[in-house]
Amino acid sequence: MRRTRVVATIGPASWSEENLQALLNAGADVFRLNYSHGEPEDKTELYERIRNLESKSNIKTCILADLPGPKLRLGNFKGVRLLNNGDEIRLICGLKSHDGPEFPVEYGGLSAELKNGDSVLLADGIIRLTVKNSSGEPNSFVDCIVEDGGPLTSRKGINVPGTMVDLPAIGPKDKAALAHALEAGADWIAVSYVRTAEDIRPAREAIKAAGKHTPIIAKIEHPAALLNLHSILEAADAVMVARGDLGVEIPLEQVPLAQQNIIDAALMRGMVVIVATQMLESMTYNPRPTRAEVSDVSTAIRHGGTAVMLSGETASGDHPIAAVETMVKIAIATEQGLESSGGKPGALSKFRSTRAVAHAGVELANASSARHILVATEHGNAPRLVAGYRPDLEVIAVTNRVRAARRMRLLPGVASVIVDEDKRGSVTMQRAIHKLADQGIIKKGERIVSISGSPLAISGATSTIRLYRLEQDGSISGTE
C-alpha cells in the first residue's frame, strides 16, 4: 500500500467531471482548491462534482481549501507586457485594475512600506526590480528599475524580501473564502503565508464558531515562519512546505535545509507534512518530467514528507493525468527502498496519552505479526499518531462519520471504514472487522490489532488495545 499521499490542485485543466474521475483513478488522494483565483462561490459546483465521484467510485474524496492569505499581487491589466533590463516602471498601489502604462498593485500600503533600494520580485522571482523612488504614502506610487526582466501578466505574485508587510493572515478575502469552504464541506483548511502562531487563531476561531473540527494546515513560505516554526506547529494540525514563495523570500540555496528542518519538526509531532511547488513543473507542458524533478520528489519522500503536491501541473497544465500517474510511480518506487517502522512521533506531539496507546498498538502489531491495525477515531488524531510510527502494515481508521473518513485521505498509509458505533467498544471494532472481511480487505487467518476508546470505541478517549484473529469459519477470536 502506498503511504505517500498525492495532492492535486484543481483548475481549468482538470475540473471537468471526466478529468476529476481520471485524477482519482490515477491515484490523486486529495483535491486542492486554490481560493487565490476566482470568487469563492465559483467553487460551489466544483465541490459537488468532486463529491459526486464517491457514488461512482465507492471512494471517499478529500478536499483541501487553500486560503489566499496576505499574498501581494498585481492587479488586472491588459495583455502580456515584456519588461527589459534597465526599464523604469511605476507601480500604482491600491488599484485592482488599471488601463494605463503603470502596473496596478491591489495592496495600497505597499507604497508606504517600501523604501529606496528595496528589492521587489514578481512572478515567483523571475522578474526583479529595485525601488528607485517610493512616495512613502499609502495608495500612491513606487518607481522601480528592472534588474531582471521577462514577460508579465495580470495577477502575478509580488514578493518583497526583507520587508514585513502589514497585512493580516486572515483578511476579508480569506474570511469570505473560509466561510465558503466550511459551508461547502472542505476537509482541510490551508492558511497561507503564516508568520506567527497568532496567524492561525482567526481561522481556528471561525472553524469553532461554525461548529466544526476542520484541521488547519500552516503554509510555511516566509522567513518569519522559520523563526517561529515550533510555535506555529503547536498551533496547527499539519504543515505545508510552500517552496514557491519561500524560495523567493530566502536565498534559493537555503531552501533544501529549510525544507528538511520543517519536515523534521513536523514528524517529531506526528504531523502531516506536504511538500509543494514545482515538483514536476516541466510536466505543465511536457509529457515526461526531468530527471532532476524525479529526484526532487523522491528526496522529499525519503526525507520524511508524508504528501507531495502538484500545482500548475494539474490545474492548468497540458498533462494533468500523466502528472499524477508519474507522482504515484515515484512515490511507490521510493517507498520500496525505505525502511518501515523507523519513524515515531516524539515528545513534542500533542495528545500524549493517545500517542502512548498508539505506540503500544504498533509494537503489539509487530510482535504478533498482525496484518492490520484498526484505529477508532472521531476526528482523526489517533490514526494520525499511529501512522507517525510508519508501521509496515495497513492502518485503517474506524469511524461513524463521513467527514472523518474523507479527512483520512491525507494521512500517510491510512484507509478508512465507516460503521455504526455500539455502546460496547469491542462490538464496534468487530463490526468493522466483519465489514472489511466482506470487502476482502481482511483475510481469514489474519491477526488484527484494534485501538479504540472504552466503553465507546469511536467517541471515547483512546485507551484500549485488543488483538483479534479472523478464523477460517469467519468468527473472530480474542473477543474476551
Image: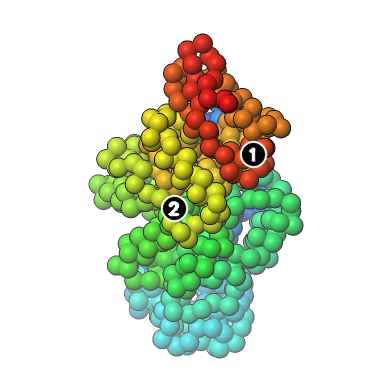
Q: Residue at x 42, y 66 (%)?
A: 246
Q: Are marks 1 and 2 in contact (CB under 8 Å)?
A: no
Q: Quadrant for the N terminus, please.
A: top left
Say whether disc 1 or disc 2 marks the residue closer to the N-terminus: 2
| Image quadrant occupied by the C terminus | top right
Q: Is residue 224 left or right of residue 17?
A: left
Against 198, residue 355 (above or below) is above
In the image shown, does 221 or 414 lie closer to the viewer?
A: 414
Residue at numbered disc 2: 345
Q: Is residue 282 left or right of residue 104?
A: left
Query: Which quadrant of the figure has residue 122?
Result: bottom left
Corner quadrant of residue 391: top left
Residue depth check, mark 1 versus mark 2: number of the one nearer the observer = 1
Q: Position of residue 207 (x, y in %)?
A: 69, 56
Q: Which mark is residue 454?
A: 1
- Between the C-alphas of marks 1 and 2, the distance is 24 Å
**Residue at (68% x, 31% y) in the render:** 424
Residue type, numbered disc 2: Pro
Circle 1: element type? loop
- Residue farthest toward the front in the current orientation of the protein: 480
Local secondary structure at mark 2: loop
The answer to whether residue 382 is above or below residue 476 is: below
